[in-house]
Image (spheres, rainbow, N blue to C red):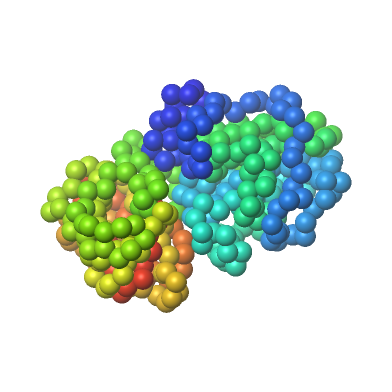
């Protein structure tokens, strides 16, 4: 992948990254020697497995998949990782999901356990709350895939979505190098559904956007107040494309915005098939009712997985919510979500 292409993907949110200014060359390196793989011993905890030792993994081909469970970019790659784990598990492949959290709620191990169970992730998960594995691999992205050969050396990496055939051929190559005579040559056939469906690139004209003050862009509400304190906001009647606004009383923090009184609203102008919003029910942890509209009307057949045709949904756990999936033709839309109860916390919009 050329640097210009990587930059385009970053701008559209196709790659999640803690250090987006590091525009590292995204082309997948095809099986050169990239050095010794860092130790996995410094993970915070392990799910689905006991902590493997280095000797446990020697002789195995290891695929390390950096993920965080609310990331749509990683979520759309998950069907392939699951399929590889299942197909090659008896041929010497070990898949390890290194969960490096982006948001605070993703540091809660029980939240990760619940998400893994909900997404049918059965391979070992390394909890990397302190970013020890992330830093050891010098990683900057979600998703990021690293292939380690049977002698413990990194031989391939890929950042972001796509190039699944190249990654699988890398798995097959390293299995054959390890002496697996029955290493398959056919590739998995995968079609993601729901939130795991591939994005509609032809209609994807809205980039990922964060709502906390540390990273947000194109915010157009009027309001007066300090960060981390309740503040009344007013939204304009109409938004420019890819701009967003708050209405009601909100507290704006570094990572998120939190509704302080019932009836608050977030509005967003976007162009994409899918609209997702990462949300949490807040400190109280109780379910919060909400309703979405498009141009002020119920979404009808454009509703996402987490709302009905009238736009109603329930915020009851911290995760990514799919709120809109437009049928063809995809057009510019004015989206709004109104929360009927206080306490809702919203982190980021992503599109597909």
Q: Nearer the viewer, residue 298 or 291?
A: 291
Q: Is residue 342 above or below residue 102?
A: below
Q: Which quarter of the image is occupied by the C terminus? A: top left
Q: Is residue 111 left or right of residue 274?
A: right
- Measured as percent of width and height from the top left, residue 294 is found at 21, 56
Tell me if residue 259 comes above or below residue 198 in the rendering: below
Which residue occupies 49% across, 55% down?
103
Residue occupying the far right of the picture: 55
Q: Quadrant of residue 30?
A: top right
Q: Is residue 65 visible?
A: no
Residue 116 shows in the view: yes
Q: Residue furthest front?
A: 226
Residue at 43 percent across and 34 percent down: it is 9
Is 74 drawn above or below residue 125 in the view shown?
above
Q: Tell me the quarter of the picture where residue 223 sits.
A: bottom left
Residue displayed at 39% across by 35% down:
11
Q: Residue 59 in the image: x percent, y percent? A: 84, 40
In this rendering, would 105 be left or right of 233? right
Q: Residue at x 51, y 52 (%)?
A: 102
Image spot of residue 327 (x, y percent): 29, 50
Q: Give x and y (percent) for residue 95.
A: 69, 48
Which residue is at the front of the view, 92 or 6? Answer: 6
Q: How many marks?
A: 0
């Amino acid at each position: 992948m050329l640097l210009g292409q990587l930059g385009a993907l970053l701008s559209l949110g196709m790659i999640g990254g803690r250090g987006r200014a590091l525009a590292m060359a995204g082309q997948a390196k095809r099986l050169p020697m990239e050095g010794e793989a860092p130790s996995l011993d410094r993970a915070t905890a392990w799910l689905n497995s006991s902590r493997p030792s280095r000797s446990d993994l020697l002789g195995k081909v290891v695929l390390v998949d950096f993920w965080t469970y609310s990331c749509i970019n990683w979520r759309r790659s998950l069907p392939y990782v699951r399929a590889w784990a299942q197909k090659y598990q008896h041929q010497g492949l070990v898949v390890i999901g290194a969960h490096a959290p982006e948001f605070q709620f993703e540091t809660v191990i029980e939240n990760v356990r619940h998400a893994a169970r909900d997404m049918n992730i059965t391979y070992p998960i390394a909890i990397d709350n302190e970013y020890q594995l992330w830093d050891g691999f010098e990683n900057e992205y979600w998703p990021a895939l690293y292939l380690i050969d049977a002698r413990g050396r990194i031989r391939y990496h890929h950042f972001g979505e796509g190039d699944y055939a190249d990654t699988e051929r890398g798995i097959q190559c390293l299995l054959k190098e390890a002496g697996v005579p029955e290493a398959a040559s056919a590739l998995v056939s995968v079609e993601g559904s729901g939130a795991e469906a591939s994005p509609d690139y032809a209609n994807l004209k809205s980039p990922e956007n964060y709502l906390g003050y540390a990273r947000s862009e194109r915010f157009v509400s009027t309001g007066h107040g300090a960060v981390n304190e309740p503040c009344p906001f007013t939204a304009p009647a109409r938004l420019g494309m890819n701009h967003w606004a708050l209405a009601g009383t909100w507290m704006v923090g570094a990572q998120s915005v939190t509704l302080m009184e019932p009836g608050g609203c977030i509005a967003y102008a976007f162009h994409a098939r899918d609209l997702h919003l990462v949300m949490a029910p807040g400190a109280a942890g109780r379910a919060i009712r909400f309703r979405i509209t498009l141009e002020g009307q119920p979404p009808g057949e454009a509703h996402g997985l987490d709302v009905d045709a009238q736009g109603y949904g329930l915020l009851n756990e911290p995760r990514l919510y799919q709120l809109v999936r437009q049928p063809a033709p995809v057009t510019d839309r004015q989206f709004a979500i109104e929360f009927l109860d206080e306490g809702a916390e919203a982190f980021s919009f992503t599109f597909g």
